[in-house]
Every structure is written in structure tokens, then in C-alpha cells.
Image (tube, grey):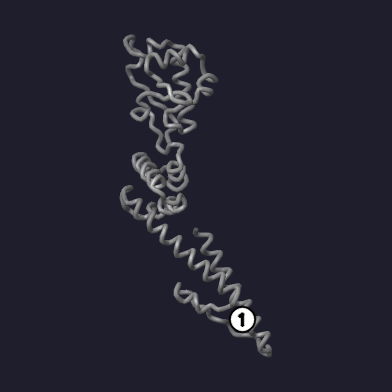
Amino acid sequence: MSDYGRIYRELWRPDKKARRAGNAAMGLWTLGISWCKDHRSAGRITRAAALELGSEAEIEALVRERLWRTTSDGYLYNDWSDWNADVEPDTIGGGLVRKAIPESQPKAVRVQLSRIAGQLITDGSDPEHVETGLRLWLDNTYPPTSLPQFVSQAARMAESNKSKLNALREAWVDGKTARLSEFGLIFTPSAAPEGLSDMALRAHRLAEKRAWIEGLVKEIEVHR
């Protein structure tokens, strides 16, 4: 997100609502912009925060001049989205974009990704799948509108990994690694030490399989 707020170049003119609200109220208005940007609140400021930054009279002046609108828990800046819209608002979708997409990506792209990610979550997508989808999108050259396809891919990968992990855990218990071939996982035993009894050889093979399986599980979990 941008660390700076924007104001209209003609805000100073005598016929503008800012002048009618008064300098004290505009001081609150300015501090409120900073508060909203810092909290990524999409132009919403709580009543408690407004009273901490200014007075009741200043709040009333901003509401009277329609610089602020009253909400259920505070106030909303008029025309916030036209002037100071957060690149990634304080939403689950916005948080995932901040986490997965670097700021080197254009602002317009991150705004669009935040909106699409939020809609996907609203429609029922798992946030983890959305985050993975964002990372997959980043590794490609497709437009932001392709994000749903990458989220679907992430969901399929997660389901495949879940099945694979279940099979690996079962194989760890009973040592039967043949079931792993459907995932392209083939256990190749090393040369066993000489002189082992049948029981000792079975124990050696089971320990070897378990070490192999544990390495595979760790690799899958690292990339989840």
C-alpha cells in the first residue's frame, strides 16, 4: 500500500466544504487519513479513534459538511476509493496478497488480485488454496483474472498431497510401499549388511523404508 494520502488540489478554496468545516476539523480529517492508511481500514475510522484524534465538535463539522459519513461503529470518508483506496485492504484477501505478492508488482495488479482473492474466499475457497494460487500466479505471466484457475490448481494439489500423505503414513506403519507407486514413488532398497538373519533383515528394511518415507513427508509439508 502507499504510505501517503492524497488531497484535492482545490481543497483550500473558500467555497469548498473543507474551509466551511474549519481548520480544527480539517486537522482531525488529516490525522484520520493517516489512521485509516495505517490500519488499512478502507476509509473507515472508529468513533473511539476519532475522539482520540479530535473533538466531538470537529467530528460534527466533518459530518455536517459531508466529509465523513456516520456508520454503525464510527465514520467513513466520502470518496475514499477515489483518492486513497488501499492497495490491499485489511481483509483476508488483502492480507494474502500482502503475504504472497511483492510490492514490486504494479499497484493496479495488486488491487485487482486483492478483490479477486476476497471474492474467491467469499465464494467458499480455502484461504490456504488462495494463497498457494497467488504464488502459482506469480510464477507465470497471466493476467490477474486468471487467479481462479491457479486457485483450482492449488486445491487439486492439496487434495493430491492429502491422499499421498495418507498413503505414506500407512506405508510407514506396515512397510508396504507398493501402494505408493500410483504417486510415482518407488522405494529402492540399498544393499543390506551381510550376515543378517531374516528377522534382522526385515527390521533393517523397515527402518530404511521409514527413513525414506519421513524424508518424503517432510518435503511435502515444506511445500504446503
Q: Where the N terminus falls, by quadrant?
A: top left
Q: Tell me the quarter of the picture where residue 98 sits.
A: top left
Q: Residue 93 at what x, y percent from top left?
A: 43, 43
Q: Tell me the quarter of the picture where residue 2 sits.
A: top left
Q: Residue at x 54, y 68 (%)?
A: 216
* Element type at mark 1: helix
Q: Residue 129 at what x, y percent from top left?
A: 44, 53
Query: Would residue 4 be found to the left or right of residue 214 on screen?
Result: left
Question: Which is more toward the observer, 106 or 213?
Answer: 213
Query: Would residue 198 be found to the left or right of residue 51 on screen?
Result: right
How many tags in the picture? 1
Q: Mark 1 = which residue?
A: 205
Q: Residue at x 35, y 52 (%)?
A: 148
Question: Which is more toward the observer, 159 or 90?
Answer: 159
Residue type at mark 1 is Arg
Query: Where is 27 relative to 82, above or below?
Result: above
Query: Would residue 105 be found to the left or right of residue 191 on screen?
Result: left
Q: Residue at x 41, y 27 (%)?
A: 5
Q: Name, please, the residue furthest toward the front.
A: 72
Q: Tell me the quarter of the picture where residue 9 sits.
A: top left
Count residues near mark 1 (Cα–Cα under 10 Å), then give few for <14, some for 14-19, many for 20+.
some
Q: Residue 18 at what x, y percent from top left?
A: 38, 14
